[in-house]
Image: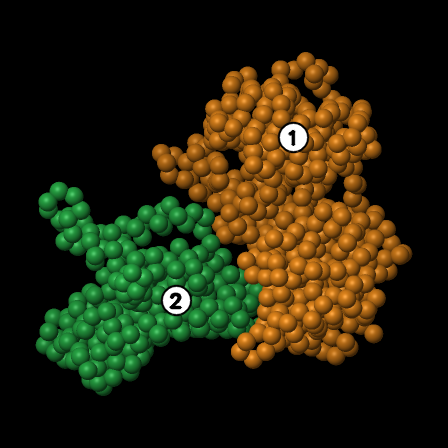
Chain colours: A green, B orange
Amino acid sequence: MLEAFFSSWVLPTLRVSTPLIFAALGGLWCERSGVVQIGLEGFMLVGAFFAAVATPYFSNPYLGLFIGGLAGMILSLLYGVTVLKLRANQIVSGTAINLFALGIPPFLSKIWFDSTGSTPPIPSESQFHSAPLVIMVFTVVGSALIYHYSKIGMRLRFAGEHPKALESAGVSVSWKRWQGVMMSGFLSGIAGGTLSTYLSSSFTRNMSAGRGFIALAAVILGKWKPIPTVLACILFGLTEQLQIRLQGVVLWGVEPVPVQWIQILPYLITLLVLAFAVGRSFAPKGLGQIE
Amino acid sequence: MSAIEFRGVSKRFGNFYANRNLSFQVKTGTIHGLIGENGAGKSTAMKALFGIYPLDEGEILVQGKPAKIRNPVHAMKFGIGMVHQHFMLAGTETVLDNIILGHEPGWIWIKRDQALSELKKISTLYGLHFEKWDHPVSSLSVGEQQRVEILKLLYQRSDVLILDEPTAVLTPQEVKELFQNLKKLKDEGKTIILISHKLKEVLEFTDAITVMRRGESVGTKVTAETNEDELAQMMVGRPVSFTYQGERKMFANASDMKPVVRIRDLSVESSTEPVKKVSFELRPGEILGVAGVQGNGQSELLRYLTDPKKFTKSAQGEYFFQGQDASHLGPLEIRAKGMGLVPEDRLSEGLLLQQDMTENFLLGQHQDSRYQKNGLLLRKKATEAVNAKIKEFDIRPPFTTVWSGRMSGGNQQKLVIARALDSNPSVLYVAHPTRGVDVGAIEKIHDAIVQERNRGKAILLFSSELDELMDLCDRMLVFFNGEIRSEYKRSEFDTWSIGRVMGGGDR
C-alpha cells in the first residue's frame, strides 16, 4: 500500500518537480542578490535544447545536462550585461530574453537536423534513469547550506536586502549580482536539461511551457527562502501530476472532462495560490534597484 | 596630538562651495562636536573625511600624517568609521550578520561562534551591554539599532567614530544611554566626532565644539568655556532669540468669532492609537496648540482632519469645516474649502525627493486654476511662483530645478510651508514645523506662522516641542491616551503643569 503510494504518487511528483526546483533555486539566488529574474523560462528553454543536442552527441547524459546548464548561463550573461552593465529595465530585458530564447532552438534545429524546432530522440542507452533526482536533492541541500552558513550566501543576501550596507563593508554589490544572475542561468539551464533528457527523451518546441514562470511563482510563494521555495515547487509539481492523472478520466456524467480544462490546472492553481495564500510580500528590499 | 586635522579643506559643487578653507583639529580621546545650521557643510566635511567626496583643496591629516582617503572602505583602514543617520542595517538579517558583514571570520563557511565570542569581548570591554545577537535587526528599537551600528565600528576596530545626528531618532531615555556609552568609549581611548544641531546636548556631552557656517569653520571652542547663546550666534552669524520677538496682533473679540473648525465628540478607531471623544473649536486669528508625548492620538487626529473620507467607517462624531459638515470629504475637497497642510514628516508625506522644487510645489495644487488650464499644467507660471517663494522664504539653494531630496531639512520645510500658504488657506494644519530644522530656519518658520495668525488665519499646531508651543500658541490642548486631558489659555501656560498632564497626571 505504502509502496504503491510511493511509486505512484511520491516519486512521480518529485520527478515532475525536479525542473521546477532547479529553476526556482536559480531564481532564488538571483532575486536574493537584488535582480528581478523573469528570464528563467528562456534559460530553461535554451538549456533543454542544448542538453537534448549534447546528450546523444557525447552519449553521456551527465555531460549533456552540464552543457544545458552552460547554455543557460551564457544566455544569462547577456541578461547580466543589459541589466547590470547597461542598467536596462529588468522586466523588459527579462521579457526580451524570453522572446530571444524562443527563437534559438528552431533556428539551430533547422541547421543541424533540418527540423522545425525539435531534436531527434535520445537513444535509450544514453538516457537518464533517476540520477537527476539525486543531483536535485544534493543541489537543494547544498543551496540551503550555502544560503545560511557561507560567506557567499550571506553577502548575496545583503546585496539584495541592503546593497549600501554591503558596499560600505567593502564588498562589490555588482559582483554579487553577477554571481546571482549567472547562478540563475546555470541552474535554469540544468532545469531545462532535466526536462528534455529526464522527463522526456527529446526536445520539442517550447517544451518549457511556462515552467520558468511557475518556478518564479514558487520563489515568491516560498518567500525567497530556499526550503519553502522547494516545498512550493513540490506543490506545483503535485498539481502537474494531478493534471496528468486526470486526463481522460470520467469525473461526472459519461464523457471525460475535456483535456484542455484539465491542463489548465497547474496554471490556475499557481494563480490562485499567489493571489490568496501569499499575502504580505517578503521581497528583498533592494530588489530591482540598481544604483 | 590630533586624531583628525582638517587643513584648508575646500569642496566645490559647481560654483557652490560646500566647504571653503575649512580647518580644525580633533584631539585624540575626546568627544568633539561639529555643529552648524543645516546646509552649513558639516555632512560634506565628514563625507570628505570618509572618502566619499574627493577634496578640491587642502588636506586631511589622520594621527598627524597626511591621508589621501579614497573611499569609505579605505577610511576604515585608517580606523575611521561612521554611524549614518539612516542606518546601514538589513532588517531581515540577524544582528550578528549585520555586524560581521564584510569581515566574517572563516574562509568559505562563516565561523559565527568565533565572531560572537569576539563581539562579547568587545561589548564587555567598552561596557556596551547587548544580548540580542541572533535577533533580526527589524525587531530592535531604534536605540538598539544604533548600538548595533556602534558595535559594528568597534568590531571593525575603528578608532575615530563619526556620528551623524545620532539623537534625532532617539527617545530622551535612549539619548541619555547613548551618551553614557560614548563616554565609556572615550575613556577607552576612542575619538568621537558628533554632528548635531542640538546645542543643549552638544554642550552637555562634548569636550570641544567646532562651529561651521556656510562651509567654513567659525571657530573651535572648549565646551566648558562656552554657552548656548554664544554658539547659536556663531552658527547663524547674528544674535538669535529663542523666543518669538515679532509683533503679535491682539484680537479683542477673538473668543466671539465664529469657529472655522468645529470638532465634537470625535472618536477615531485605529490600530496604532485611537482618538477618544475629542471636542474643540478653532477660530480665526488664533494658534491652537496640540501638545502631548508622541503616540497619544495626535497623529491619528491630524490624519482624520485632513482626510475624513478615509475614516467614514472607523470614525464617529462631528467635523464641521467653515460651518459645513466635512466628515465625508476627501483631502482635495477639504483643500478646496481652504485647508493648508504642513504634514508630520516632510520626507515621507510632504515631498517627492527625486523631483524638483516646482514639481513639489505643484503637489496638491495641480488642480488649482492658477497652475493648470484644461488639464494641462502651466509650468512657467508655477516656476515663477516658486521663484517668488524662494525669495520670500530665503530657500537655498535658490534654483527651482533642485531635487528636494538634495536640499537641507530646513530648506525642505520652508518649501513645504510656502506651498501650504500659497493658496491662501483660511485654516492651517501644521505638524512639527521645525523638526530637524536649524536655528535660523526655525526663526523664519515661526515668523511665518505668527504672521499668518495675525492675518486672521486659524492655525492648529501639532508639536512635540513644548517650548515651541508655549512660544507661539494662544491656546493649547494637551493629549494623553487619545483624549484631550486639559486645555490651557496663554495666560495659564506653565511648563510643569502641562508636563504633568502630558504624562497622564493632574493639572
The residue carrying mark 2 is A25
Which chain does the residue under circle 2 lie in? Answer: A
In this rendering, position of residue B138 left or right of residue B21: left
The residue carrying mark 1 is B482
In this rendering, position of residue B324 left or right of residue A182: right
Which chain does the residue under circle 1 lie in? Answer: B
Q: Quadrant of residue B51?
A: bottom right
Residue A198 position in % (x across, y down): 25, 72
Please, what secondary structure does the residue beneath circle 1 have?
loop
Residue B226 sits above or below residue A70 on the image = above
Q: Neighbour class for label 1 at 10 Å: few (<14), some, many (≥20)?
A: many
Residue flagged by tag 2: what amino acid is it? Leu
Q: In which quarter of the image is residue A238?
A: bottom left
- Numbered disc total: 2
Q: Distance from label 1 to label 2 (Cα)?
A: 49 Å
Residue at image point 31% right, 52% down: A270
Extreme residue in the front direction: A1
Residue B222 position in % (x across, y down): 86, 60
Residue flagged by tag 1: what amino acid is it? Gly
Residue B148 visible? The answer is: yes
Q: Quadrant of residue B448?
A: top right
Residue B340 position in % (x across, y down): 56, 32
Q: Are marks 1 and 2 in contact (CB under 8 Å)?
A: no
Residue at image point 51% right, 61% down: A161
Residue A43 visible? The answer is: no
Q: Neighbour class for label 2 at 10 Å: few (<14), some, many (≥20)?
A: many
